Image (spheres, grey):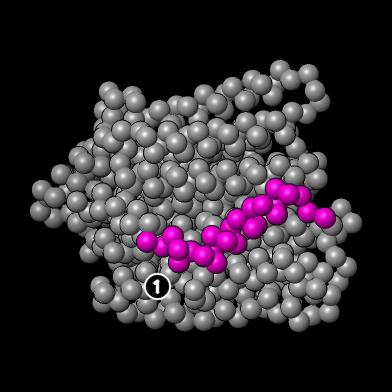
Amino acid sequence: MNWTLAVPEIFLSVCGLAILVFGVLQKRREPSFSCTVLAIAAFVVTAFLVIQAPEGAGYKGTFVNDGFARFMKILGLVGAAFSAILALDYNGRQKIDRFEFPVLLLFSTVGTMMMASSENLMTLYVGLELQSLAIYILCAFARDELTSAEAGLKYFVLGSLASGLLLYGISLVYGFAGTMEYTGLRTALTGAGVVPAGLVIGIVFVFVGLAFKLSAAPFHMWTPDVYQGAPTSVTAFMAGAPKVAAFALLLRVMAGPFGHLAHQWQLLVELVAITTMLVGSLAAIPQVNIKRLMAYSSIGHMGYAMIGVAVGTEAGTRGTLVYLTTYLFMTIGVFACIMAMRRRGRPLDRISDLAGLSRTDPMLALAMAIFMFSMAGVPPLSGFFGKLLVFSAAVQSGMWTLAVVGVVSSIIGLYYYWKVVKVMYLDAPLPAFDRRAPSISFVAGAMGLVTALFLLVLGPVNGAAQAAALVLFR
């Protein structure tokens, strides 16, 4: 058992326990700020440990550390760290600055890292549940607000249903294949002449359980209400790192043990990707709440990223990884801008509240415009390159329907993204927002620069994504 493979996860778990004890023992009324700073430092140190961790498989084949796992873990840690930075100011203003928040954020991130390194269906399930249970609590963290309690309950009920479907699928796969290890599954399925129908049904249930976590249509019902009701600091985290981890699972499972059965599940993934893109694009059009708009936008983006999974090739996986990278930075930046929407101490979340922002706060308006156009796929912003890679992979594999639907959905999306920009630059100005915290300005500015100048780092990111994709197809 090579326990050193899991040093980053062990370190982060120990940090979580230490921060929890530190918070409990503090004599001051609420040590939330110091606990959040410690959690951010833990994320940074863990990222260095991930980079330095040796490659290989350990824990009797249930845990693997390779280039793909490293890529996804770094993305998850980046998303968690920036979400924690955003929470520094927001949670204090919303009176939810309790030290349990960064601890839950930290343990959820441990779950995302386990998901990226899973090499066994049970490791997959344990990592997914560790991540999900913490997020259920975070959604209801503003316990005095009805919408937050409702969001937590809805996510818990529907998430439990999805977990049950996933566990049922795992039991079917184990029953028909006789093993839960990915390498064992691949060996067993490669030698099988005719794949049993029960095994195919099990694969479908596993996919459905993961599709729920991705908020892919038609398993997206929870997303708009939870995004709107949960505290914005929680929504910023949910929209980023957990989606990356769920895609890590989906890619590793579908390309690994079930890779040579692509002809059995490819049509299902293609239909889900098409449905997700169309539902996300069309349902976003009538939205007047910016957080609900971002919920449907997130659904659409998961559909675009799923194109690479449906293609089932190295080029498709590389495109998905680059797309997830661009999506993570865009999403964190947008939610930083949403957190800056405060007037007279009250948080605002309607698109109309952005009216005339270009005259009252031109830098915030510029950052929001960059994120909106990037999400629409306008060159030379980062979103354009992500879409270009997944659409190119679909075309190269002859999946023209996927590519055409993706382009049409992007054109539809341009309408509602432009609506936000139009309100900021063309409508009559409303009173200026409250002075925003330096932490929010830092995150919005940093994400805006990465999004606008992504072309400068496209080569290294594309190279890292290529190396990660090669791991799954070697």
| Number of residues whose C-alpha sits closer than 10 Å to that of mark 1, classed few (under 14), some (14–19) or many (20 or more) | some
Nearest the eye: 383 or 409: 383
Q: Which residue is mark 1?
A: 388
Q: Which residues are magenta?
A: 435-459
**Element under disc 1:** helix
Q: Looking at the magenta stretch, what is its main secondary structure? A: helix
Question: At 26% from the left edge and 35% from the top edge, which residue is drawn?
Answer: 56
| Residue 415 left/right relative to 160 | right
Image coordinates for residue 391, horizontal then vertical, percent: 37, 73
What's the amino acid at mark 1? Leu
Please name the residue shown 54% across and 60% down the image: 450
Q: Quadrant of residue 23?
A: top right
| Residue at horizontal 60 percent and vertical 47 percent from the top | 82
- Front residue of 421 and 269: 421
**Picture coordinates of residue 157, whole percent (x, y):** 58, 47
Say left or right for 296 vs 23: left
Q: Quadrant of residue 441?
A: bottom right
Q: Position of residue 252 (x, y in %)?
A: 32, 49
Position above or below: 16 against 164 = above
**Residue 138, located in which quarter of the rendered image?**
top right
